[in-house]
Image (tube, grey):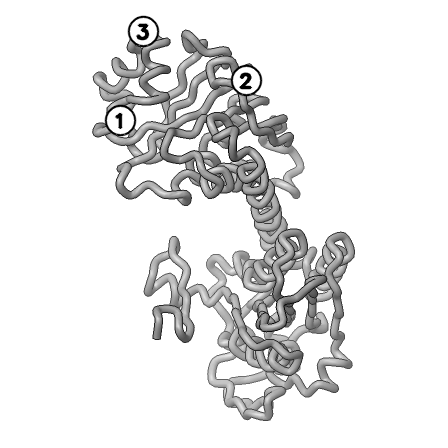
Amino acid sequence: MRIEIESQPYAFIQADALVTYVFDKTDKLDGVLGDIDRSMDGHLAALVESGELSGKALEFVLVHFPQGLEATRLLLVGAGKPGKFDTADLRKIAGAALRQLKSRGVKKIAFLAREDERGPAEAQAVMEGFICGDFESDKYRTEKKNHREIQSVSLVGFDSEAESTVADAVERGRIIAESQNFARELINEPSNRLTPRMLAARAEAMAKETGLSCEILDEKKITELKMGALLGVAQGSVEPPRVIVLRYTPKNPRPDAPVLGLVGKAVTFDTGGISIKPANNMEKMKYDMGGGATMLGAMRALSFLKPSAPVIAVIPATENMPGARAQKPGDVQVAMSGKTIEVINTDAEGRLILADGIFYARKLGCTHLIDAATLTGAIEVALANVNVGAFGRGFFGA
């Protein structure tokens, strides 16, 4: 997908579709929307008056051959209430618009930002929305549902005087979104096609492409390091565990820079072990390596964004299976730190492998730590399945 920043006026953009957005009924259709409405002889105002164009969040109204525009379609997307509108909403609008138009065979899309959303942050958000929206999850379908492809997307209406700043923001959005899609692709892989060893190989290949340093610890090295918590989880599976270690080292690090550690839970399939999960929806337990995939995606992005602080990712990878050698409720494991852990429920495996991952990250010199894990059940109960739980020290000025 080609990415462009258009400097010419929106009316002269030759595209299959020009996309912009409308707020709820308080939107006065002024500025650029007022200009479009006048070129269309009041057609937008008539759509608002009839209630067809209400501005409700992610509502779509498609106008074919809009008068006064070179684009052959005008897609108006509802943006909800203007007082609550932010870059996250802009990202959603761009992604949803691309999905809507892609299904109609559109090849070239232009996105027209409103007057108050034309800064670098907004340009980045639109680009992230486009690229994440273009992601397809049908890799293993025998017959693809949608062979259609978007050839190009362009951003229209951004300040030409700040073109280099906007271009940098668009590039940053591209890097972040492509790294998100890299993580999403890993997360979607079935567990027979992404075992711990396969995940390590994918990480190694990504590191080679991006210039990151990569070390893979096999079961022998894991045993030598006395990672008993990780080994306890892994012992029920015929698939051996791995610990993936990625390093980003800046060329000119700040003298006072912290060493950031990213630790991600990568249970490539979680049956729950002896404390086995219900069969219903167990196929989704391939997603239990989402924390590790997220950290791999973050490291990919950092390799291009090049921050001034060093970053080390530690990703313990294993399966949690109820094999003949699996750990049992009541077993005691000794973590790398020397702490003893009594296992009451073998489905609490995430905290075990993270215990060794976090301790190892500290041993490698990390001064600040972030861990990511799919501790799904309890978070869904507390925060529903649309929110992420964040726990830490000092987040709120404490």
Amino acid at dot 1: Ser
Label 2: which residue? Answer: 15
Label 3: which residue? Answer: 41
**Dot placed on the residue nearer the N-terminal end, 2 or 1:** 2
- Position of 21 with respect to 353 (left or right) is left
Q: Secondary structure at mark 3?
A: loop
Label 1: which residue? Answer: 54
Amino acid at dot 3: Asp
Pick whichever, 12 or 75, lies toward us. 12
Label 3: how many Cα within 10 Å (few below 14, some 14–19, many 20+): few
Number of labelled discs? 3
Amino acid at dot 2: Ala
Please tell me the numbered disc located at residue 165.
none
Percent position (x, y) of residue 354? 56, 76
Tell whether label 3 touches label 1 (CB within 8 Å): no
Instruction: Determine the residue positioned at 55% across, 33% down.
Output: 163
Which image quadrant: the N terminus?
Answer: top right
Instruction: Determine the residue positioned at 58% across, 45% down.
Output: 172
In space, the residues marked 2 and 1 are separated at their CA atoms by 25 Å
Q: Find residue 392 and report its image quarter.
A: bottom left
Q: Find residue 225 and report its image quarter.
A: bottom right
Instruction: Determine the residue positioned at 62% across, 53% down.
Output: 305
Pick whichever, 321 or 302, lies toward us. 302
Which image quadrant: the C terminus?
Answer: bottom left
**Dot placed on the residue nearer the N-terminal end, 3 or 2:** 2
